[in-house]
Image (tube, rainbow, N blue to C red):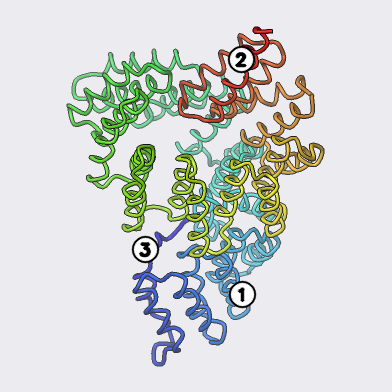
Amino acid sequence: MFRLPIFASWLVLCLMPIPGAMAQQPSDTVAADQALMKGDCRGAVEGYLSAGMTDRNPRVIERALQVSRACRNLPAASKAADRLLELDGENVDALRLVGLVALESWRLDLARSVYGALLAKPDVEPDRALADLLPELAEGDATHAAWLVLREVIPREGVSGQTLSSLARIACNADDLNACLALVQAARAKGAGSDARTIRMASAAFAAMGQEETALTEANLLVQGDPENHRFARVETLTALDRLDEAREELLTIERESTPGNERVAAEADRRLALLALATGDEAEAERRFGARLAADRSSGESLYYLALIAERRGLPDLALQGYRQLIAAGAGLPPRVRAAQLLLARGDREDAMTQLDQALRGGRVDAIEVEIVRSRALFDAGLATEAFEALDRALDRFPEHPQLLYQRAVLLDADNKTTEAVKALEALLKARPGDGNIQNALGYTLADRKRQLGRAESLIREALAQRPDSAAFIDSLGWARFRRGDKKGALPLLERAWRLSREAEIGAHLGEVLWASGEKAKAREVWARSLVIAPESKPLRATIERLADEVRKTESR
């Protein structure tokens, strides 16, 4: 989903003329303009929406809708979309905008109706309309909803291979790999799907499905077809297949065999070797390579970030903070600010920590919702639970009923041992967004993890998986629910598949625990060791290992 950066977009939207309505602006619009200039997002939304609900000019309500989206006010955007549909329901651009808001608000029936009407218009060429629409939906919060709608609305026979290839990208990003690959095949049958992006996508999908040789065949097509621009496609596929030793050997070969005048390839191989060393726990090699790259001024910002991260992992917070501050001063994005804020909170400097996050919002380059989620998590992890919830409440005042913020509140409630409140919050969110697989999974996992309503928990997760059959998180949830129901044998293949799809530390914690409970303690330790290399700071992982180690100590002391 494309997002207008909130602060950067205010002035742009404020200065947008309303055709046919400039002679006499409603007082609500004037007040909204003033609010926007002051940075009062909520006041601006209320003013524009009030004007748009009474003015018959569709451009007035369209402005309200655009400002509502930019300000991430989904209830106001939804209300404005309904009004725009009423006033200008035959306009193609209006239908496209209404459809986007319907997806963001999880109003899937409305989205199906709107997109169906748009594509059915006699003056609309589907391929041209979809060429504008699909790239915007391929990534972001609305991708999952977009796939559930568009897979039903877009006629496979009536569109080009290029459109099918674009739709395949949405399917892949919505964790429906079989559908993704079927669409790639259909696109190729129509003479499309031979572009580099589609081949990369197919290679990644085959790798995720465990079809190793087919994945490598796709990657080889890229390398052979355009070795200059896709020299590392095979390395990327080997990495996705977790064949890391082979990936390293290929990178070393590329680095060694790079010819004079082709230093760019050697430098990129060096960069990837540094990242691979860090991912496999070889901090000394990663530090050596990133240090050399920093000295040579090669991707110096990235090198400095990872050197600071290595220092942090080695228990050198002052050195790490120094590196993050250098990056912040140079205008880096959110990641170094988050790490810096966490370090500052750990040493009790709350004011400076919050300043780092507040400053990230001022340039309009980052997602304000993401910043507020990071803020609440950092405060909570620092032992400041009350302040974490207060921060979320302030964010919800600015971004009313935003589902990501409400979801984060439920997560923190559960982490704060307020599971009953967390479940109520997720139930309310699911009622507002019925059938949203992300919320179904979250609620099902929470119930299963706390050993509550295990039958319902599993049903919720299975409903979510029907929407996103290849989601590592959803598969992990189902495996964990089976384990909580006493089915170790049924849980194990699910967790192993989730682990193959995504080497996330919490999935590793779950897989290791089920292996441990099944008597495969050596394999459990192996998975945990790998998980600790990937995310040494993971609290769920460390808590699992320490809990089971404590059980072993108690058993041995008897």
Q: Which mark is residue 7?
A: 3
- Name the residue at the right extreme: 455
* Three-letter code for the amino acid on which mark 1 is drawn: Leu
Q: Decide: is 394 above or below 261.
A: below
Name the secondary structure under disc 2. helix
Compared across the picture, whether 537 is left or right of 493 comes to left
Name the secondary structure under disc 1. helix
Depth-wise, is mark 1 or mark 2 nearer the camera? 2
- Name the residue at the bottom extreme: 24
Q: Decide: is 317 above or below 551.
A: below
Disc on the earlier residue, 3 or 1: 3
* Three-letter code for the amino acid on which mark 2 is drawn: Ala
The residue where tag 2 is placed is 524
Name the secondary structure under disc 3. helix
- Frontmost residue, 21 versus 39: 39
Sort mark 2 into few (<14), some (14-19) or many (20+) by Cα contacts within 10 Å.
Answer: many
Compared across the picture, whether 238 is left or right of 525 comes to left
Compared across the picture, whether 282 is left or right of 191 comes to left
The alpha-carbon separation of the residues under discs 3 and 2 comes to: 48 Å
The residue where tag 1 is placed is 85
Q: Where does the image place residue 182, in percent across and percent down from the top left?
A: 65, 37
